[in-house]
């Protein structure tokens, strides 16, 4: 993907534009997220924090669902947690933190006619009333799940400007409504701005929205850069994957092969429904879930990172949110040839299949040099979350 523009250039342009000055009135921003606030820290939370920090009254609406919850204990706990948090002390369904509001809506999944009618007649009107009370009128809305629920909420809110922040190929997710492609097309036509996190997603939406913009993942550069060195390391001993380990795109055969090849495989994150025998293998060091702000410390002793996603119709549109976090450390990154990784081919090592991953990891000491390390760090620096936010903010103001 294209590298971000220099932060100084963007800041200078904003300082010269009266729309961005402190005397200007910033509209409320509502993020209709596809995740819970407390789940893996990623783009949704980063943008919410940055909007709030920039002076926009910001509301983060936790996911309204895309599929029916499972019948397992973990899914039941999530359902009960949502019900409990949908009514906080004092009768409020929201909490204020870090200069923004986190709202946990009570809503049914958009998977059947009965559930959709219940949402339309009972739950969505309540959500709209709550959001109008919390955020005020005429908000800017960033929409994530392209569901009927999202469309119904948008109709009720009547926002001054709507963005579809397209971060995943939701249509291919297991268990989503059968008409997800239809509701996504409707959302694409309805919104004022479309931002896509990968070139593959950008190409996908262009027939409907040729004006869509690329807005890839970012990184808290200073936090992850603190681990970096421009000197090549020696032998690769500890290899790390962090994030949601149980994600459907994961190629577990690669992770197992890395452990079998004699490397210490450090895994950090929610196991989800990942294959349990992976964590019992010799050489696998599972650290559990780690708060995002503690990730840099959890990388102590890591020699290389892996991004081992299968390359198929589901994953080809993915741009892993961890990419620039890995690159900012200066450590080598070995990834499968997802289109987003191919775009970064100068900065990551591409490998196909379990055997090739092991071979590349073993050969890294002979391929690494100071120039490659500095280039990785520089591309991460140019794609900080601050840079990403300012690009998106500029695009929003061009439409307001």
Image: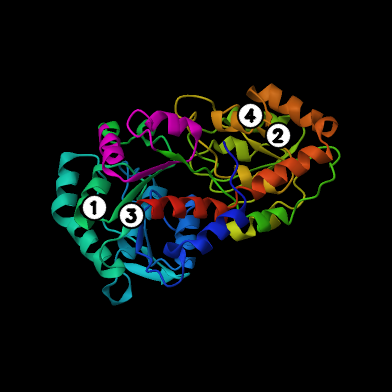
Give the side of residue 215 with respect to residue 347, left or right: left
Query: Picture coordinates of residue 306 (x, y %)?
Result: 66, 37
- Mark 2 highlights which residue? 259
Kindly identify the residue that appears in the image at 47 percent across and 30 percent down: 200
- Give the mark count: 4
One can see residue 117 in this view? yes
> Are the residues tagged 2 and 3 within 8 Å (C-beta)?
no
Q: State the separation of the CA atoms marked 1 and 3.
A: 10 Å
Q: Is residue 283 left or right of residue 395?
A: right
Q: Is residue 115 above or below residue 355?
A: below
Kindly indicate the quadrant of the structure image that contains residue 3: top right
**Which one is in front in this view, the residue at disc 4 or the one at disc 3?**
3
Residue at image location 30% in from the left, 45% down from the top: 191
For residue 7, above or below residue 264 = below
Indicate which disc residue 323 carries. Answer: none
Q: Secondary structure at mark 4?
A: helix
- Which tag, 4 or 3, sits closer to the chain's start? 3
Q: Which residue is mark 3?
A: 141
Question: Of the residues under marks 1 and 2, which one precedes in the sequence?
Answer: 1
Gap between marks 2 and 4, in whole Å? 9 Å
Residue 254, labelled with which disc?
A: 4
**Marks 4/3: CA–CA distance:** 39 Å
Q: Earlier in the sequence, mark 1 or mark 3?
A: 3
Q: CA distance from mark 2 to mark 3?
A: 44 Å
Residue highlighted by disc 1: 153
């Amino acid at each position: 993907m294209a590298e971000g523009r220099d932060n100084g250039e963007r800041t200078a342009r904003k300082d010269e534009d009266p729309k961005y000055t402190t005397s200007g009135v910033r509209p409320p921003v509502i993020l209709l997220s596809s995740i819970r606030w407390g789940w893996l820290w990623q783009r949704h939370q980063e943008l919410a924090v940055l909007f709030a920090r920039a002076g926009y009254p910001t509301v983060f609406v936790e996911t309204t669902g895309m599929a029916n919850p499972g019948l397992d204990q973990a899914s039941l706990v999530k359902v009960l947690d949502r019900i409990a948090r949908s009514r906080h002390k004092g009768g409020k369904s929201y909490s204020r933190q870090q200069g923004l509001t986190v709202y946990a809506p009570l809503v049914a999944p958009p998977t059947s006619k009965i559930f959709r009618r219940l949402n339309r007649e009972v739950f969505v009107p309540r959500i709209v009333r709550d959001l109008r009370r919390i955020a005020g009128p005429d908000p800017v809305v960033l929409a994530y799940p392209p569901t009927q629920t999202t469309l119904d909420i948008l109709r009720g809110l009547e926002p001054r400007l709507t963005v579809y922040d397209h971060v995943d190929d939701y249509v291919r997710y297991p268990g989503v409504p059968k008409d997800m492609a239809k509701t996504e097309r409707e959302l694409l036509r309805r919104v004022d701005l479309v931002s896509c996190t990968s070139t593959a997603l950008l190409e996908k939406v262009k027939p409907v929205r040729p004006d869509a913009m690329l807005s890839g993942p970012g990184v808290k550069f200073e936090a992850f850069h603190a681990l970096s060195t421009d000197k090549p390391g020696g032998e690769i001993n500890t290899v790390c994957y962090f994030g949601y380990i149980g994600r459907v795109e994961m190629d577990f055969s690669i992770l197992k092969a890395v452990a079998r090849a004699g490397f210490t495989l450090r895994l950090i994150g929610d196991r989800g429904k990942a294959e349990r025998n992976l964590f019992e293998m010799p050489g696998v060091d599972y650290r559990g879930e780690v708060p995002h702000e503690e990730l840099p410390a959890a990388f102590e002793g890591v020699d290389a990172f892996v991004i081992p996603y299968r390359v198929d119709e589901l994953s080809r549109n993915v741009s892993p949110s961890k990419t620039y976090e890995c690159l900012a450390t200066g450590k080598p990154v070995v990834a499968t040839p997802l289109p987003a990784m191919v775009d970064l081919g100068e900065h990551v090592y591409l490998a196909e299949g379990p055997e090739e991953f092991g071979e590349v990891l073993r050969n890294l000491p002979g391929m690494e040099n100071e120039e490659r390390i500095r280039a990785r760090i520089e591309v991460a620096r140019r794609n900080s979350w601050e840079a990403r936010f300012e690009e998106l903010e500029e695009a929003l103001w061009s439409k307001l």
